[in-house]
Image (cartoon, helix red, strand yellow):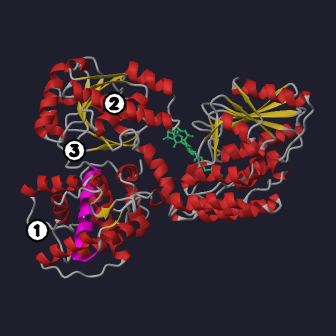
């Protein structure tokens, strides 16, 4: 087999070339190849070497696919030490993204040149790890302790200009990587420069107060994660010691983190979000063109979808019921874009251009005649959907894709409202649509493969994480939400406080508990859902009605300053409203329920069992293709803690038999709600787990 690393001589300059598609990850062959090429250079007459990579990016890290396996020698830290120890200088050229082990290879080189658009980063924390090949030891020596710790705890990709300012690279170039390397190597030769080892540099003095400030910010922002502060600990301790001692500390911490469930969970998330984007059945299916998008409805969702499309370079025609409403929608979009300018995410002149050239707002449906895809985001009623899709069917060009942003209505029924059901699918965005990464792509019964492929192409264009979902009430995300929300309400009826439940789930890792989320979304949403379901509700179904009481009191949550929590100057983020406990106590009394205490552990156990059980039903029915699709949906649309990998991965971690036992125990008291998913029972009987269904 060809080695992915080659050495070639160009006069006095040697070139070490890495070529291991798709991202030049430092798998075993690359590590062996780098050592061999370094030895060839050392033994050669060349005086300086250029280390460069082929393809779209420099080394984007260690090969994540090797994690969890027994590591093979040479280990990356040793490969980098081997390069750094060379007696002749090595110039590393960075293009694309030098990430993780790739950034560490650059730090082990003697000089670094970045070409235009290059970025460098240490994103290991996104995998529950820390840099494990010298990043926590060399980076502080090169750029200072605080900038180094900020860089590897944020995991962010640092642009070339900032890399130069930080001293992370020695020069920028707008030449090709090879030419940039040759030019810089020649200057090293001309100036007779020698090797410059970062490991021999001292960490510059830094302000302890700055470090404490960074650590407290991380403790707040990365609540529940173990790797970030562990990384700082290793950097600080190692920075005070000789380099080799520091490396031992880093190695120890790295290997301990490698064994943690958090690492397994976050690597599961890394690969899962890439798997949901590439559907096996769409291999070779060509999507339809996507240049001009129509949006029906300029409210919160319609406006957010329009902004997401505009920021991704697509033309947008947004339709509202009349010109006044259309102008209001345009003003809303203009404001959101202005916020992006304020946050430095968009240039002011670009905003002007988008509003002037790319966005059309109108009340005339005929202006949709030439759009490639249209997304309906109007009021959630079948009558209104019928009116809209009948018009779209009459006006849109043949081949246009007709999509609904409904969050639960029957897409098959909506498709049947048109003469082209094969061109209809669901595109379920999450609010705010220009921020939330998740896009549920609902594949209706008659949706044509190229129409589904067009939905996925739109997700890619909008940089969304797509998940294919089948048709059912609430698709993947909201269907499962309705179950664990109900499990929460049942515990409240039985005696738990909604505030205890929120606190326990925040401690579990959720950004917010279900009752704080209800206040954010609006108590009226829950009320209208209960009203909608009331006519068909089974009389055995238990449900909480205190939300209706709050609704009738006009306490709709954050938007009215009171819901489950009170939101005022004293507590802008909300404080528990004792009156809610009284209203709930009344309901229990009326239903003849004697309340009891709940432990935090029991709350997590029941809440998660309900989530996992419904997740298994959704997979069992084919609404979600694989358990990983459920995980990605919950991670990117419902704030499930990433360091737990998603509910199905979490279930594998605690054991499916444990989950099933909880469900069966609960079914003793309520066998209507707690009906074990057939798939869950099957997997337990077969001694298998959910990840076995993710393969392939
Ligand atoms: N290892 C193995 N495969 C990888 C990989 C990696 N590091 N990075 C990407 N891939 C695969 C990915 O699964 C996909 O495969 C294909 O490459 C294209 O990726 C010792 C321990 C580089 C910014 O965390 O952030 O170094 O789906 O679809 O959108 O300290 O990939 O086609 O089969 O994402 O253009 C640190 C992870 C590792 C970077 C490109 N590095 N990668 O994004 O393409 S830990 C990372 C990314 C480490 C050391 C430690 C992105 C990207 P497939 P893609 P993209």
Image marks 3 and 2: residues in contact by CB distance under 8 Å: no
- The residue nearer to you, when weighing 109 against 338, is 338
- The residue nearer to you, when weighing 575 against 438, is 575
Image marks 2 and 1: residues in contact by CB distance under 8 Å: no
Are there few (<14), some (14-19), or many (20+) residues within 10 Å of tag 2? Answer: some
Residue behind label 1 places its C-beta within 8 angstroms of ligand 1 = no
Which numbered disc flags the more N-terminal residue, 2 or 1?
2
Mark 2 lies on residue: 331
Secondary element under disc 1, as helix, strand or loop, is: loop
Mark 3 lies on residue: 471
Are there few (<14), some (14-19), or many (20+) residues within 10 Å of tag 1? Answer: few
Q: Which mark is residue 328?
A: none
Residue 101 visible? The answer is: yes
Q: Main secondary structure of the magenta part?
A: helix
| Mark 2 and mark 1: Cα distance apart in space | 48 Å
Residue 311 x, y percent position in the rendering:
43, 30
| Mark 3 and mark 1: Cα distance apart in space | 25 Å
Give the residue drawn at x 65%, y 45%: 26
Which numbered disc flags the more N-terminal residue, 3 or 1?
3
Q: Quadrant of residue 306?
A: top left
**In the rendered image of this protein, does residue 214 appear above or below residue 50?**
below
Secondary element under disc 2, as helix, strand or loop, is: helix
- The residue nearer to you, when weighing 285 against 551, is 551
Question: 54 left or right of 598?
Answer: right
Q: Which mark is residue 540?
A: 1
């Amino acid at each position: 087999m060809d080695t992915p690393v080659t050495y070639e001589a160009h006069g006095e300059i040697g070139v070490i070339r890495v070529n291991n598609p798709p991202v030049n990850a430092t798998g075993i062959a690359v590590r062996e190849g780098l050592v061999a090429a370094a030895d060839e250079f050392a033994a050669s007459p060349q005086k300086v070497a250029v280390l460069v990579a082929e393809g779209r990016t420099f080394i984007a890290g260690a090969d994540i696919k090797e994690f969890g396996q027994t590591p093979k020698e040479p280990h990356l830290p040793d490969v980098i030490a081997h390069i750094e120890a060379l007696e002749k200088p090595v110039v590393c050229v960075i293009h694309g993204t030098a990430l993780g082990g790739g950034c560490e290879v650059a730090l082990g080189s003697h000089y670094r040149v970045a070409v235009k658009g290059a970025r460098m980063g240490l994103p290991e924390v996104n995998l529950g790890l820390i840099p494990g090949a010298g990043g926590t030891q060399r980076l502080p020596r090169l750029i200072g302790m605080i900038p180094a710790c900020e860089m590897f705890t944020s995991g962010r990709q640092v642009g070339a200009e900032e890399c130069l300012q930080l001293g992370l690279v020695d020069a920028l170039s707008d030449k090709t990587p090879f030419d940039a390397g040759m030019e810089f190597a020649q200057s090293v030769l001309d100036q007779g420069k020698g090797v410059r080892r970062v490991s021999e540099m001292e960490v510059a003095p830094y302000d302890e107060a700055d470090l404490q400030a960074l650590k407290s910010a991380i403790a707040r922002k990365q609540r529940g994660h173990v790797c970030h502060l562990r990384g700082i600990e290793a950097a600080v301790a190692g920075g005070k010691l000789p380099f080799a001692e520091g490396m031992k500390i880093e190695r120890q911490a790295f290997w301990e983190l490698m064994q943690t469930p958090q690492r397994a969970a976050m690597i599961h998330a890394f690969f899962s979000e890439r798997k949901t984007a590439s559907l096996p059945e769409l291999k070779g299916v060509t999507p339809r063109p996507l240049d001009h998008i129509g949006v029906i409805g300029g409210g919160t969702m319609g406006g957010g979808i329009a902004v997401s499309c505009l920021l991704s370079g697509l033309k947008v025609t947004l339709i509202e019921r009349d010109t006044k409403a259309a102008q209001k929608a345009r003003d809303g979009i203009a404001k959101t874009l202005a916020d992006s300018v304020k946050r430095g995410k968009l240039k002011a002149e670009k905003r002007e251009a988008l509003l002037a050239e790319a966005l059309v707002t109108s009340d005339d449906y005929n202006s949709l005649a030439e759009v490639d895809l249209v997304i309906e985001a109007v009021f959630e009623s079948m009558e209104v959907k019928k009116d809209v899709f009948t018009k779209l069917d009459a006006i849109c060009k043949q081949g246009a894709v007709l999509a609904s942003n409904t969050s639960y209505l029957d897409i098959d029924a909506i498709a049947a409202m048109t003469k082209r059901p094969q061109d209809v699918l669901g595109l379920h965005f999450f609010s705010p649509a220009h921020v939330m990464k998740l896009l549920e792509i609902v594949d209706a019964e008659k949706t044509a493969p190229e129409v589904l492929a067009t939905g996925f192409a739109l997700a890619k264009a909008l940089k969304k994480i797509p998940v294919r979902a089948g048709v059912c009430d609430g698709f993947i995300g909201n269907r499962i939400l309705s179950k664990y929300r109900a499990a929460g309400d049942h515990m409240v009826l039985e005696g738990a406080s909604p505030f205890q439940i929120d606190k326990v789930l925040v401690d579990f890792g959720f950004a917010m508990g279900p009752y704080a989320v209800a206040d954010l979304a609006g108590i009226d949403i829950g009320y209208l859902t209960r009203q909608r379901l009331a006519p068909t509700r089974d009389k055995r179904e238990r449900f909480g009605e205190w939300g209706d009481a709050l609704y009738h009191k006009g306490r709709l949550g954050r938007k009215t300053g009171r819901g489950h929590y009170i939101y005022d100057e004293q507590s802008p983020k909300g404080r528990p409203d004792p009156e809610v406990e009284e209203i709930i106590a009344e309901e229990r009394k009326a239903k003849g329920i004697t309340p009891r205490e709940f432990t935090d552990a029991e709350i997590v156990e029941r809440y998660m069992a309900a989530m996992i059980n419904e997740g298994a039903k959704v997979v069992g029915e084919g609404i979600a293709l694989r358990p990983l699709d459920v995980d990605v949906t919950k991670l990117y649309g419902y704030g499930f803690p990433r360091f737990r990998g998603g509910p199905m991965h979490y279930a594998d971690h605690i054991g499916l038999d444990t989950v099933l036992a909880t469900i069966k125990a609960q079914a003793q008291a309520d066998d209507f709600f707690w009906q074990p998913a057939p798939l869950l029972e099957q997997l337990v009987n077969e001694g298998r787990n959910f990840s076995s269904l993710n393969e392939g």
